[in-house]
């Protein structure tokens, strides 16, 4: 069995990365002859995931599950989708092991512990929920829980209608008329709430926005942090309890957005700031006289290379940090710009009207916290969508086009097929 990749070693999985575990426990027949196949892989520009499949030769039971191998996102995410037609049932859905799937109109909810780590369609999630509810119906009758039996049966019938099952006509035959199914379909909303921020619903209009889908990112409560395995704050440990209303109980996550850690001798830095006579009169801060280099790993060929960093001032603007990487092994190069100095008191919004081709040559300095909005094509890039860069208007648009071309993990390959072979989630 191979070990899981380290943080910077995740890549698209292949047959060599497959691990097989024999003599596993089967939850269906309770035997010990099942086999688990595990594949760690990375979906481009999405997440690091671990795909696991369990098959039992004794009872033919088969189950698939997806676990996220990457980091927990800084904020949780709640996705609300309005299902208005049977075609929306074919949207692919990623439900992580910390996500909750809910249909408010019928007060139905799939908790994180059920259908955990699922890559399926909306129809597949609904049909698996129907199967899970039906499996326990005989047990409810055996225990005499008649009230819950009838309540579950009512929910099952509603879920069947929401899953787009064909109606039965007066002659007892299924009505396969698509127009009839469309006319009988009633719109409803689904909510996918994931405190870890690792769940996803397919957007068929990508890269444009989806008018039927709404995204809401939120900061987790201390209780949600604990459920995800994040350690509580020192104050919460001392109190011996978790209080969501107490801000001091919130888990503090210091995530450095981009860049690298550079070790600088504090004594040398202090001497430079004090203009030590032994080092000469230096009236400029550290880093302005020469570019500093530090070792790093090339993101393309994974070999050792160097990143150069220099601090400079842009006239009539502010201090910026320029970082550049050039790999001599494979020729890969990249550059990034970070804002230096303190955070300004006010934010800035700049609107540019591009009226002629010459405007495309205007220079643009975009920080890693800036967003880009082009209303004419309904394109909005939130902060973090692109790193800080110094380019032209044309270069910025080309960079956005390249990023969007590969940013949709379900826009290429088998995932781009609209007619899914199986909707059972397995």
Image (spheres, rainbow, N blue to C red):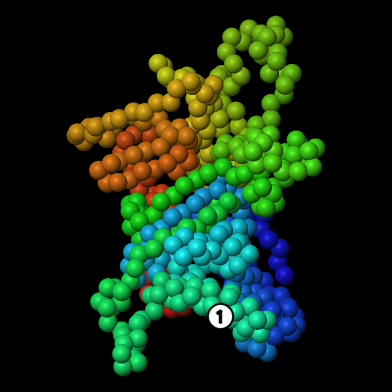
Tally the numbered discs.
1
Query: x, y percentage for residue 8?
Result: 62, 51
State the quadrant of the N terminus: bottom right
Which residue is painted at 63% across and 64% down in the image? 113
Q: 173 left or right of 63?
A: left
Query: x, y percentage for residue 415?
Result: 43, 68
Mark 1 = which residue? 134
Q: 34 left or right of 105?
A: right
Label 1 SS: helix
Query: x, y percentage for residue 371?
Result: 40, 37
Q: Nearer the viewer, residue 114 or 90?
A: 114
Q: 171 left or right of 225?
A: left
Query: x, y percentage for residue 420?
Result: 41, 75
Which residue is painted at 54% across and 77% down in the image? 150
Which residue is painted at 68% across and 34% down in the image? 248
Q: Nearer the viewer, residue 367 or 204?
A: 204
State the residue lying farthest toward the bottom.
171
Q: Residue 116 appears in which quarter of the rendering?
A: bottom right
Q: Nearer the viewer, residue 377 or 137?
A: 137
Residue 213 can be seen, yes or no: yes
State the residue lying farthest toward the left.
356
Which residue is painted at 56% across and 30% down in the image? 309
Q: Nearer the viewer, residue 294 or 10?
A: 10
Position above or below: 296 against 105? above
Residue 398 can be seen, yes or no: no
Position above or below: 84 against 267? below
Mark 1 surroundings: few (<14), some (14-19) or many (≥20) residues within 10 A = some
């Amino acid at each position: 069995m191979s070990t899981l990749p380290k943080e910077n070693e995740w890549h698209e999985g292949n047959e060599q990365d497959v691990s097989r575990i024999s003599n596993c426990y089967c939850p269906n027949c309770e035997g010990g002859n099942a086999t688990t196949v595990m594949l760690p892989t990375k979906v481009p520009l999405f997440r690091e995931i671990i795909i696991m499949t369990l098959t039992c030769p004794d009872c033919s039971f088969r189950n698939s599950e997806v676990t996220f191998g990457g980091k927990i996102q800084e904020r949780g995410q709640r996705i609300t989708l309005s299902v208005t037609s049977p075609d929306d049932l074919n949207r692919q859905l990623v439900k992580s092991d910390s996500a909750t799937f809910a249909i408010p109109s019928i007060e139905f909810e799939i908790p994180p512990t059920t259908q955990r780590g699922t890559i399926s369609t909306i129809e597949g999630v609904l049909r698996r929920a129907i199967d899970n509810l039906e499996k326990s119906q005989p047990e409810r009758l055996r225990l005499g829980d008649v009230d819950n039996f009838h309540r579950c049966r009512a929910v099952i019938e509603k879920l069947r209608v929401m899953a787009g099952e064909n109606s039965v006509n007066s002659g007892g035959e299924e009505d396969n008329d698509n127009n009839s199914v469309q006319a009988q379909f009633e719109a409803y909303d689904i909510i996918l709430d994931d405190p870890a921020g690792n769940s996803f619903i397919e957007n068929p209009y990508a890269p444009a926005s989806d008018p039927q889908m709404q995204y809401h990112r939120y900061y987790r409560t201390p209780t949600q942090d604990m459920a995800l395995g994040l350690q509580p704050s020192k104050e919460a440990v001392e109190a011996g309890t978790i209080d969501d209303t107490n801000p001091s109980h919130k888990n503090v996550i210091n995530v450095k957005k981009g860049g690298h850690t550079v070790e600088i001798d504090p004594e040398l830095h202090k001497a430079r700031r004090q203009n030590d006579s032994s080092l000469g009169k230096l009236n400029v801060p550290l880093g302005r006289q020469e570019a500093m280099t530090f070792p790093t790993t090339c993101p393309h060929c994974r070999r050792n290379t160097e990143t150069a960093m220099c601090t400079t001032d842009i006239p009539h603007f502010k201090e910026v940090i320029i970082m550049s990487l050039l790999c001599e092994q494979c020729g890969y190069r990249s550059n990034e710009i970070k804002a230096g100095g303190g955070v300004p008191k006010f934010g800035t919004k700049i609107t540019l009207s591009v009226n002629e081709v010459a405007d495309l040559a205007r220079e643009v300095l975009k920080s890693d916290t800036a967003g880009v909005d082009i209303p004419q094509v309904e394109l909005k890039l939130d902060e973090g969508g692109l790193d800080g860069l110094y380019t032209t208007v044309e270069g910025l648009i080309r960079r956005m086009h390249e990023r969007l071309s590969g940013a949709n993990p379900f826009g290429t390959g088998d995932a781009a097929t609209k007619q899914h072979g199986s909707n059972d989630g397995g």
